[in-house]
Amino acid sequence: MFFRRIEAKAKVSGGARDASPLVMLDAVSKSFNHAHGRHIVLDRADLVIRSGEVHCILAAPGAGKTTLLNLMAGAEQPDAGRVVRRGRVSVPLGSAAGVIPDLTGRENCRHVAAMYGFDRYGFEAYVQWLSALGPLMDLQLRNCSASQRAQLVFAMTLGLEADLYLLEDGLPMMRDAAFAARAGRVLRERLSQAAVLVISSQPKALKPFGGRVSVLRAGKFHPGIFPSKAEAPHGR
Ligand SMILES: Nc1ncnc2c1ncn2[C@@H]1O[C@H](COP(=O)(O)OP(=O)(O)OP(=O)(O)O)[C@@H](O)[C@H]1O
């Protein structure tokens, strides 16, 4: 049910071209030195995310999804070019970013709250409620299942008020019915007021969101459509 609402929201955001830019990447370059050479994540890449829009980015595994989210949130700096933010961007709490496996869920909440300077008790209580993890909040993340970790990360992402939410790999597996109901309600609420950027290597993780599609390939963004499984990007 809430997927349909997300799609409806995405259709509304089809007219987002006229909405004001929220985050702009202006000729941004970012690369890393590796033993085997330089890995170019972005090469003078341009991208505009507008207020209220749903924007999906498809990128091959290892292409730089986490790096891109960190750049958008200001957690990493570009080598060249500019990232301009005109609103509040959520912490990039995707599956690979932002959480520390050696800490418990509760400690991760405190860590993020301290890092971004907001009320840790309020944030912790909200995440505990939304994630429905109960006593698992006190277990080291490395000892939690993938779906429990995903529930925590998702709740932490939505626990922050933002104009743009950054999601890596879309929605977590919703095995827990209580979590699915709550997460759907909160996500609908958030999407009615904010923009969302979802990035994944998996078209199926992006499809429920609909909206505009870009493909990150060879360091640049290209306009895209949702490919069939056979056409999903494999190369970098
Ligand atoms: N701090 C860093 N130092 C060196 N190399 C890095 C650093 N951060 C990322 N990289 C490299 O940049 C490339 C992109 O990494 P990133 O984690 O952003 O990709 P990803 O698409 O999120 O990966 P995955 O599909 O595995 O989640 C990889 O080759 C990675 O090794």
Image (cartoon, rainbow, N blue to C red):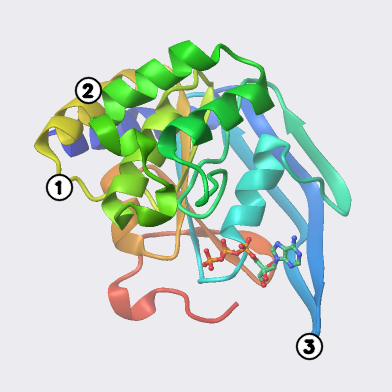
Percent coordinates x, y for residue 75 in the rendering: 72, 40
Which secondary structure, mark 2? helix
Residue 36: mark? 3
Q: Residue at x 89, y 52 (%)?
A: 80
Q: Residue at x 27, y 51 (%)?
A: 147
Tell whether 168 sits left or right of 150: right
Residue 185: mark? 2
Q: Residue furthest right?
A: 80
Percent coordinates x, y for residue 70 in the rendering: 66, 45
Q: What residue does disc 1 label?
A: 175
* Front of the two marks 1 and 2: 1
Q: Residues within 10 Å of mark 2 (few under 14, many from 20)?
A: few
Q: Quadrant of the C terminus?
A: bottom right
The amino acid pointed to by label 3 is: His
Percent coordinates x, y for residue 29 in the rendering: 81, 57
Q: Residues within 10 Å of mark 3 (few under 14, many from 20)?
A: few
Tell whether 227 sits left or right of 22: left
Q: Quadrant of the N terminus?
A: top left
Question: Marks 1/3: CA distance?
Answer: 41 Å
* Front of the two marks 1 and 3: 1
Q: Residue at x 43, y 23 (%)?
A: 159
- Does the image show residue 217? yes
